[in-house]
Amino acid sequence: MDKFILSGFADEIDMDLNIQMDVMDKCNIKHIEMRGVDGKGLVEHDKEKVNEIKKKLDDRNFRISAIGSPIGKIDITDPFEEHLDLFKYTIDIAHTLDAKYIRMFSFFIPKGQDPYIYRDEVINRWEMFVDAAKDSGLVLLHENEKDIYGDTPERCLDLLKTLDCPYVRATFDPANFVQCGVEVYPYAFNMLRPYIEYMHIKDALSIDGSVVPAGYGDGNIDKIIGELYKENDNPMYLSLEPHLGNFAGLAALEKDNNRIENLPSSGEEKFITAFNALKNLLSEIID
């Protein structure tokens, strides 16, 4: 397991930081990809509150694997100046929380329009992110997300190659590619492999886009993790993002009787379900 560091979006457990850490401790996970905490988004908290969060984390020996920011998750046609200011504040938060990574996006494209129409504006805005983060010591992680410019591997690659910046890398999310009708492995994975520095553990069914635990969908997460395990020299974060909704067909997809029988209802149960699925995959791969 030394090639991977487990983390997760603990706000899917509960918005209360203490409850988040209680459940993460049950899973023996000491890193959080912090997105929402104590009632609202992390980047919505003032500096005093961020310092308070840092103290709580330190008191229980928790670290932040990445800031799960909403940066770049606005319409490409929206005004940008205020959003750029929010990004600069996010850099400050990342330093306060001793985080190396900021998770980001490449802007929602107007529905029904060709994303390439907005390519230059996407690149221009990302160049301003890059400039703002210069000498910060941070790594900006672009996540492939539905309906943004970089929702296909080709456009992710276009962004990453065009920016050609050592501190702009990729967060690879298999479920998001499944939901965009993309072959995750080997196609998307091989295309983006030189840039992948972080991974979200979220799986989905191609038939309807339903999010399911790792290994139950069409994201080929087992094959991807197997490749990373063989190739990686440095530890990589595997960050759980359960996103589990009501999925009546989960039992029919069970691979053995030791897997989950029924989809749980609470945030804690869903997170632990996702954790157990990942733990089983890792055991199969590493053993």
Image (spheres, helix red, strand yellow):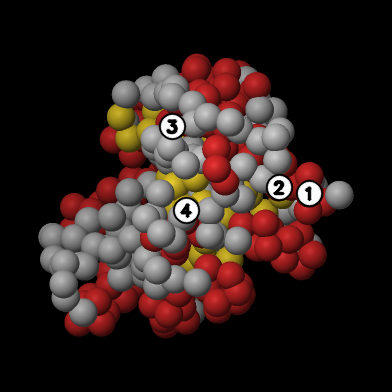
Residue named by callout 4: 204
Residue 213 falls in image quadrant: top right
Which residue is located at x 31 percent, y 70 percent? 149
Residue 107 placed where, x, y %? 27, 63
How far apart marks 3 and 2 lie (CA) works out to: 21 Å
Residue named by callout 3: 12
Q: In this view, does 2 lie above or below 76?
A: above
Which residue is located at x 40 percent, y 68 percent? 181
Q: Do the residues labelled 1 and 2 touch (CB within 8 Å)?
A: yes
Q: How crowded is mark 3: few (under 14 residues within 10 Å), some or many (20 or more)?
A: many
Given the image, on which type of amino acid does mark 3 rest?
Glu
How far apart marks 3 and 1 lie (CA) works out to: 26 Å
N-terminal-most mark, 4 or 1: 4
Residue named by callout 2: 281
How far apart marks 1 and 2 lie (CA) works out to: 5 Å
Q: Which of 101 and 282 is in front in this view?
A: 282
Residue 240 placed where, x, y %? 55, 42
SS class of the residue under badge 2?
A: helix
Residue 222 falls in image quadrant: bottom right
N-terminal-most mark, 3 or 1: 3
